[in-house]
Amino acid sequence: MTKEKTIAEKQLFTPFNVIAGIIIFIGVIITILRFTRGIGAVTNLDNNNPWGLWIGFDLLCGVALAAGGYVTSSACYVFGLKKYHSAVRPAILTAFLGYALVVFALHYDVGRPWRLPYPIFYSPGTSSLLFEVGLCVFLYLTVLFVEWTPSAFEWLGFRKLRAWVLRLTLVLTIFGVILSTLHQSSLGALFQIAPSKLHPLWYSGYLHVYFFISSMFAGMSMVIFEGTLAHRWLHDKMDETHLAEAEGVVLGFGKAASLIMMGYVGIKIIGIAVDNNWHYLTTGWGFWFLFELVGFVLFPAILYGMGSREKNTTFVRIAAFWSILGIILNRLNISVIAFNWHLPSADRYVPSFLEIGTTIFIVTVGVVVYKFIATRMPILYEHPDYKEHH
Amino acid sequence: MAISRRKFLTSMGAAIGAGTTGALTKAYGATNQHFNGYPESFGVLHDITRCIGCRKCEQACNEVNKLDKPEKPFDDLKVLDQKRRTGEAAYTVVNKFGGTPDVFAKKQCNHCQEPACASACFVKALKKDKTGAVVYDESLCVGCRYCMVACPFNIPAYTYNDPLTPKVTKCTLCLPRIMEGKLPGCVEICPKEALIFGKRKDLVKIAWKRITDSPGHYMEHVYGEHEMGGTSWLYLSRAPFETVDMREDLGITPAPQFTSGALGTVPIVVGLWPVLLTGVYAISKRKEKIADEERKEAVQAATDLATTEMNKQLSQLKNKMTKEKEAAVKTEVKKALDATAKKAAEEANAAEKTPVTKEAVDDDTGNEEE
Amino acid sequence: MEFFTLHDFMTYSKGITYLIMGAILVFMPIYWLYLTDRDD
């Protein structure tokens, strides 16, 4: 009796669960504060800086890093590259949870979250890129949810439903690529309305192209990075196929990411040329811009290239993490660092601890749910009863 | 099949080229169309040279809109020592800029001809009215604050500390009062006529008349005539506008035009991506099929070759075996014959060598019974 | 239909465009099925 209880306790109070529990508890407190005392009580947002960490990180980085879903599923089902098959479900799960968390985070940031359906169902502001973002995110979340359901159905044993959903795979994948192209690019285009507020080295008429292209290697890098974490923490849940295909996925995405990142560096340089902004490169902001572009795009791109050439998965995994940092840096630069660059430093924005706490809380919820699903449903392995599906 | 695929790809290439070029050029969201604004819209002309910084306009605005009273009263002029921006209970502020004498300028929503806030709003909570006022509808606002990001003049404020009914706040051009034929609160109370209200097109003329009537007295520029595509609030100043916190680097492009390129690409993606992606899928499926067939053929050919080889070897072996068998038979036959011949020869020899007996001689049959 | 501002024009034209986009997304899969019906 006592022995069972101890074992049960042991399983519940793992270090992971305890830390996650504390973070979630704090998060609940912050949530209460937010909805009883307003956004101002929890954030450092003000009239000059209406968007801060929640938009810059939770929304922009969240969406960019969840791009692995459309990249992996299109690689496998549209481009016919079967070696990525075992990576599809984890990527779709990440994307689904990522977008769900973005919507969750939005409930904190937006003044009246219960009105979020308004722009789509009640009063569409069709001139707005934010309308486009909202519509696409709403539709894409639905697509991702449907793409995830086969795993759940296999877990629950709903054979017919699962078979029916699987017939939709190609259509959903293509629809997913379309929606992803649209909202990834539109998030960048949002800032195109404020040329007077974003530093010229980051502002461009091509912002929407930059965001779309960078979402591709953001997604690939996340797939590699998460695969690395899953191998460390969820290894026992992976079947032979998954383990056997892992290296191919890492090296394949490493090569692809390297190429795309090189292209991205090229079009960023073109953007400077087109607006004749070279002289900004020799300023302090110019250094920061090059720090981001050279230090966190060009260099990891080269490491990716070396890794894929020499079949060195360690290089590729390091490059993946490095690239992810670069994506985060880029999105934060555009939304909060290089945004309002001309304001005096007293008027600049820095996130509050409660804002940071909320972000950590939201990410933790994501990790907890991911772990719950990946340890119970056929994400990292193929369900033995359904092995025939491909 | 090869020809139609090539044609397909070429026509796709052309279509994408045309489509994306069209969408990426920085033309209007409406190519070749020009918009002049509502013809009878109102505006306000603010002659900065006449402002004395009395802050009565701030007070009138506060009263007309029934806003919360500020901490420091409106006649406290020490407030002017700090630069202020509009806030949730301050739709307008007057700021002081150094000089001899001091220069004062009033700031509030400029009611742009092509408002960035209205363009940004994804629920149509902000709209340009035909009177010229940019109107905010609190009943639609979701609180995304994109309008605040978009406004190049940093005007809209937000009630961040209201947990359940937060809203955007800004000058309303006193639309209710205008509709009653009254003047906006600030215009009415200004003791120095630094603010005059009228039809925008008339105010532009008045502004230029003042400039030309008093050469050297004003900057030769009517701020708001063209900035961001034109605003309903127009300004005259003696000091350069940058020195009174009015940015001169905003350009004349209206805000909606900045996003029309990206917005224009959206439907092209929806129209072409299904075609492209299905095409890629079809090509990859075809390649798979061909690869499968080629593999099957290769396997078949290899099998056939192996079979032929095997048959050849078999028949060779068979021939060889047959030959060997025949040879062996021949050898055996020869051997047998040789043996028989040898035996016969031996017997013949034996018969010659042995003495001939009577019985034996008489009997020439050779039959010897011994 | 007269538009006085670019914004009004864009709201209207984009509104119609979104509806067309929806129609395309419904029509295209149907058309693809029509094209590939008789494939092996």
Image (spheres, coloured by chain):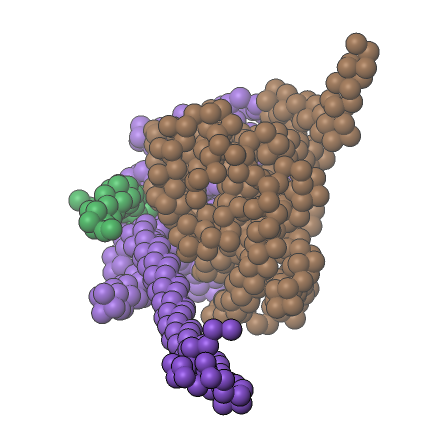
Chain colours: A brown, B purple, C green
Q: Quadrant of residue A279?
A: bottom right
* x and y percentages locating residue A273 in the rendered image: 50, 72
* x and y percentages locating residue B1 in the rendered image: 23, 65
Q: Nearer the viewer, residue B240 or A180?
A: A180
* x and y percentages locating residue B185 in the rendered image: 44, 32
Q: Which residue is drawn at 37% across and 69% down?
A: B311
Q: Residue at x 72, y 27 (%)?
A: A17
* x and y percentages locating residue B285 in the rendered image: 35, 56
Q: Residue furthest toward the left?
A: C1
Q: Quadrant of residue A10?
A: top right
Query: Does the image show residue A180?
Result: yes
The number of callouts visible is 0
Q: Nearer the viewer, residue A245 or C26?
A: A245
Q: In which quarter of the image is residue A3?
A: top right
Q: Which residue is drawn at 70% across and 46% down?
A: A346
Please say if B321 is above or below B39: below
Q: Residue furthest toward the top?
A: A1
- Of the 4 image quadrants, the one containing the N terminus of chain A is top right
Q: Is residue B204 left or right of residue A33?
A: left
Please say if A230 is above or below A369: below
Q: Which of B270 and B49 is in front in this view?
A: B270
- Of the 4 image quadrants, the one containing the C terminus of chain A is top left
Please say if A150 is above or below B311: above
Q: Is residue B119 left or right of residue B343?
A: left
Query: Does the image show residue B149?
Result: no
Q: Residue at x 49, y 57 (%)?
A: A213
Please say if A368 is above or below B29: above
